[in-house]
Amino acid sequence: MVKSPPVSSNVKIPVAVISDGKPGHENQSIGIAEHIPGSEIILLRHNLKESFSEGLFRLRLRIFGSSVRGAVPLLRFAFDDSEIDRLNKHSPKAIISAGTLSAGLNFLAGKLTGAKTCVIMQPSMLPLDMFDLAIIPEHDNPIDSPKIVKTLAAPNRVSEKFLSEEADKWWSELPTGPKVISWIIGGPSGSADFDEKHVLGGLLETLVWAGQRGWQVWLSTARRTPETLEEGISRIIKGYPSLTYALLWHTDHRNPLYAMFERSKVAVVTSDSVSMIAEAASAGKGPIVYRASVSGKRKGNVTKQDRMVERLIAEGYGMRVNDPDELTAQLSIVVKRQEEFPRLDDTNRAAERLVGVIS
């Protein structure tokens, strides 16, 4: 593959992100946009849901496409005229979206503005040849094509600049000291079992280990974390001095992850949290992926997420552990490492390909 030439940050590149409002999808799209040097980003959110009428909307685009003149009436399916006017005035060079519900709107916005179109993940019902570039994870087994960028994990916002900015923003709130381990907890999902007792057991073993060796543990939960688990964590905070920082999502809806990553030696992430595993890998924190349940996999099936994690580990971006004893043994090895972990560079590589398409 020929690498596209670097673009000077003095050159401004207007970019539009179309989002269905799902945080994971939105962060993937914004992550690609932010990795384009000189990008000037506008965000357009829509409220489309999976429905019969939305399916017909995509089917109509697949069969008939759209002319420039026909794009505006169809865009009104999701946006009012003021948003369409804002898009037009921005004159984007690229339109970026993630997920099926935004793909048709991406196509129409490209028709209207003449921008290059970039979709993240394979949209349902809409063929990839409708778009100028597609960013698809390897675990979806995409075909080989000049229009497709294959990634190990989902794109994200992690970059050295973004991590530094987040660390500055959270500097006064986070404790001082260099010996930090981040502990990131997700929660149950349709593709991952989650055992609260097992997760809490791993956390407690880490806190004992850290307390004996002079390390701090910083903790963050997520919107999927069961409130009962957060209540259990609240009860044990005072009993473990090594837990010097804890932000519980259902009490404080903020996201300190990027600042935590910037100041940590390593991150422990529960295995259900594939997006946060990818972010930790992109930050070079060699995530220790801690199995979120005793059974490990939902109904014994190997999911796409499982395959993603296994590929990351096989490429040297992290490690997987199954129980508390294995976790603390791995921590003892990791904290002695002098070299930094490799940083997963998927998002930057995908952004470079998009710059090449724009050029």
Image: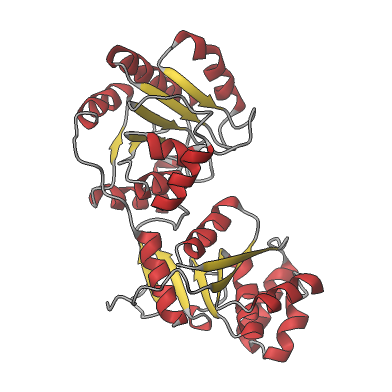
Q: State the image coordinates of residue 164 (x, y, percent, origin top left).
A: 43, 45
Q: How many marks?
A: 0
Q: Position of residue 196 (x, y in %)?
A: 49, 25
Against 32, is 328 above or below? above
How far across and how far down the image is residue 59, in percent?
65, 78
Q: Residue furthest front?
A: 10
Query: Which of 101 and 167 lies nearest the eye of the viewer?
Result: 167
Does residue 332 sit above or below 350 in this rendering? above
* 45 w.r.t. 145: above or below: above
Seen in the picture, residue 28 relative to 61 is either above or below; the reply is above
Q: Residue at x 33, y 77 (%)?
A: 5
Front residue of 103/341: it is 341
For the C terminus, the image quarter is: bottom left
Name the residue: 64% across, 27% down: 251
| Residue 236 appears in the picture as rendered | no
Left or right, 37 with reference to 16: left
